[in-house]
Amino acid sequence: MPDESTISEKAPISPEATFLAEVQQRSGETVSRCYQCRKCTNGCPLVFAMDVMPNQVMRMIQMGMRDELLRSTTIWLCASCQTCTARCPNDIDIAHVMDALRQMSREAGVAAEQKIVRFHEAVLDSIRRYGRMFELGMVGHYKLATLDLFGGAKIGIEMVKKGKLKFLPGGIRAKREVREMFERDQGE
Amino acid sequence: MEVSYFPGCSLHGMAAEYDESLQAVCETLDITLRELADWNCCGASSAHFLDDELAVRLSARNLTIADREGRELLIPCAACFQRLKHADKELRKDAARWVGQPYRGKTAIYHVNEFFDRPEHLDAIRRKVVRPLRGLAGVAYYGCLSQRPAKVTDSQAPENPTSMDRLMRAVGMEVRPWSYKTDCCGASLPLTRPDVVRRLSGKLFEAAEEAGAECLVTDCPMCQSNLDTQQADIKAEQGKQYNLPVFYITELMALAFGHGRVDRWWKRHFVSPTALLQSKGLWGNDHA
């Protein structure tokens, strides 16, 4: 029998009944099928940096642990390498579940890795403006948003010297068509 | 033959040497690349990270253009390839939802390795080699997105792809076996979590050296950039000095085809490949 005093000292789990349904609806993936074989975690190259293992993510969704999960670093450190998705014996697209969790985390305003959020926002902003990614402009936007002005500066300067970063955006003609894709999205 | 071509943002920017070397290779092989008219960014990792629907729409527009052009579609960037393949599957299921118009879905979509590995191209490649890259030992690094997940990419061997191994042998290289062909390099994290990228790419360099490789070969611009740019910082952080050039497969094909202006690509690499190539007698005054 477990010692009762130990149990009471641990943070209580307050499962949220609707979380599993919400994640399944949003991702289109049947997370309830996960039976904890741990293939996802065994193959994941990012586990050394994660605070929750991928198999635990699946279990926490089933348990309705919304807050813990949406605040985890794991969902942002997932690089979407697709190894878990490719190997899941229950055909759960785990990387796509991570997409759904990231989006819910950002919407709830609790994303743990703000720099990663700002980076992807800067990329999308560049696409919205020009229809294509303008790398130098995107990096500038990201640097201003995070005030991480000198991180990676040496590599950046070297890239400019090697002519790897263009100074002008090469936009497309159908900019409006692309912009409408963003607007339609906000409307929904 | 004529092929529709989706270069993607990287090949028009940071990976211009991939674009130029691919154009050079295709010219030699009599393949005409027709750039997709007014293509837009596929959204890369960022669109699906933040907005699933936007991710499909961005790629879908490009597919409808390719659908009208009716040719095979070559996508050299692994991330673009995977995003367009994903959108292609969605459009086949429900074109009305995404593009509000019929989608024939007859376009065959290829990334570089699978495209050149087709028997007719492989034969032509062998015939066009004038300077076999003898004695140059490398590992084939495929990365993630040209392979996984197979239900999207239609990869025949996602855990152990061999198409680039065959291309490397076709141009005379020595291909070293290793188990890290499809391990992740850190993808879109170099600006935000460079520590993670250094750890992952450091593991790849260690394994490549253990396999006896003198260089890595890839067909993904994100992988090439992550691996090529981080070696100096890995030395600062982990104390290990790697000096492993990271080639695009098309750069090596062009070199083997005797293409005259390959040196302008070497100048864009962080880890210069000239010393290695000179030591093998594959690069020297007569080529400059």
Image: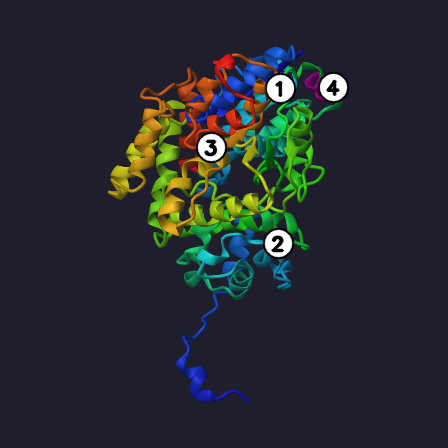
Q: Give the secondary structure at mark 2.
A: loop
Q: Residues within 10 Å of mark 1 (few under 14, many from 20)?
A: many
Residue B251, percent from left and from top: 54, 23
**Is label 3 or label 4 in front?**
4
**Is label 2 or label 4 in front?**
4
Q: Which residue is mark 2?
A: A30
The amino acid type, in three-letter code, at marker 1 is Asp
The amino acid type, in three-letter code, at marker 3 is Gly
**Is label 3 or label 2 in front?**
3
State which tag comes first along the sequence, 3 or 1.
3
Residue A53, percent from left and from top: 51, 60
User: In the image, what residue occupies the spot 46% across and 18% down?
Assistant: B263
The amino acid type, in three-letter code, at marker 2 is Thr
2 and 4 marks on the same chain: no
* Dominant SS in magenta: helix
Q: Which residue is mark 4?
A: B123
The reply to whether the magenta stretch includes residue B254 is no
Where, by quadrant of the figure, is residue A35 drawn? bottom right
The reply to whether residue A80 is in sight is no
User: In the image, what residue occupies the spot 32% across and 40% down?
Assistant: A152
Viewer-side residue, B130 vs A170:
B130
Segment tinted magenta in the rendering:
B120-126
Contact between marks 3 and 4 (CB within 8 A): the answer is no
Distance of label 3 from label 4 (alpha carbons):
35 Å
Tag count in the figure?
A: 4
Q: Which numbered dot is residue B203?
A: none
Instruction: Classify the position of the N terminus of chain B by image quarter.
Output: top right
